[in-house]
Amino acid sequence: MATETATLRATERQYHSTSSPYVLPNDQSSSAVEQDRLDAQAAAIVEMIGGSPFLAPLLSMTGISKAVDMGCGTGVATIQMAKIFPSAKVYGIDLSPVPEAAQKLAPANTIWARGNILDADDSQYTDNALNREIFTPGGLDYLFGRMLFLGINDWAWYFTTASKSLRSGGIIEHQDLDWKFYRVGTSECLSDDWEWHRAVVAGAEHAGLSTCAGSGATRFMQDAGLEILSVRSFEFSFVPSSKTPNSQAMGRYVQAKLMPNYPELLRKMLGAKGIGVDELERLTNDCLRDLSSEPGVHQKYTVTIARKP
Ligand SMILES: C[S@@+](CC[C@H](N)C(=O)[O-])C[C@H]1O[C@@H](n2cnc3c(N)ncnc32)[C@H](O)[C@@H]1O
């Protein structure tokens, strides 16, 4: 499948057409390349964080009637959640349609919703059926969001909306990435010296994206009135290393399926900053070299769990 990813030309890819800043493809009808990538990423994340997709103690949570997977992608985590909570309504919401194969596999208590999370605004509760149903104030028992750093450009708003939607005692689990790169087993930052990385960070900021959607969540959650229960950090490896065994599958996935997306990702993020073609090619080559050469080079992946008081 890696070669399939590599040979899919930029012009063959498909993208959502909403106002969300999310720049990665969704490839629904012409191929399943992006769906395959997201499923491989989900499996690598599960291995990286210890074997379970959720670190909140879901099995000990009782009386769960409504849960949501924000930006559910292929619905892989939504289905896992729906199996854990068979008596609850479990919603998967995304900009793009969930693949038909996943819809067929999903238990009957799964409900798919297509929409932009950023539209889940109080003022729209009355005329937006989706929001009225999912984000009713105090209605959610569990809210899960994973790898949304490219899609959410207002985290203060996101966590405030999440907090309002949770019932008292409800749990939120947020799993996300920061943009800096570090040496294996350390917090020695490598990317501060990389010119291409500085340009990408400037592009992200230009698009209103946070470069610390993982480690920065704690503050936004606290500001939204949520009580932090736990914060754990993991190494999201770009190259496998024997020093971090749980992140080896991640390193293999990144090299095979994520890196082929980087030239187009950089083109979108740097193009918006007015960087010309030759400069873009040079920065892209530097990026591909830096993210493929050193075993264990990684971004920090943070899992934050909080409770609505
Ligand atoms: C990197 S994927 C992660 C998918 C899934 N959470 C997982 O971990 O398997 C990000 C997903 O979030 C969705 N997304 C991004 N911004 C969104 C938004 N504003 N509203 C709804 N979905 C969004 C994208 O369409 C994409 O499917």
Image: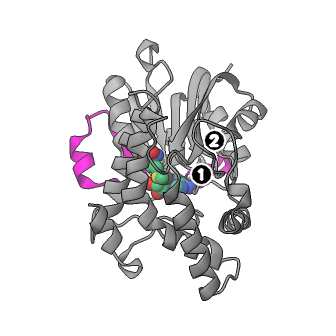
- Asked whether the viewer can see residue 40, the reply is yes
Asked which secondary structure carries label 2, the reply is: loop
Q: State which region is magenta.
A: 98-124
Nearer to the camera, 110 or 303: 303
Q: Which quadrant holds the C terminus?
A: top right
Side (left or right) of 141 relative to 253: right
Contact, mark 2 vs mark 1 (Cβ under 8 Å): yes
Q: Which of 173 and 213 is in front in this view?
A: 213
Amino acid type for the residue under numbered disc 2: Gly
- Residue identified by numbered label 1: 149
Tell me, what colour scheme is on the image?
Answer: one colour
Whether residue 115 is visible here, answered yes or no, is no
Residue 214 marker: 2
Q: What element carries label 1?
A: loop
x then y, percent, for residue 84:
35, 24
Does 117 lie within the magenta span?
Answer: yes
278 versus 150 height, above or below: below
Identity, as a three-letter code, of the amino acid under mark 1: Phe
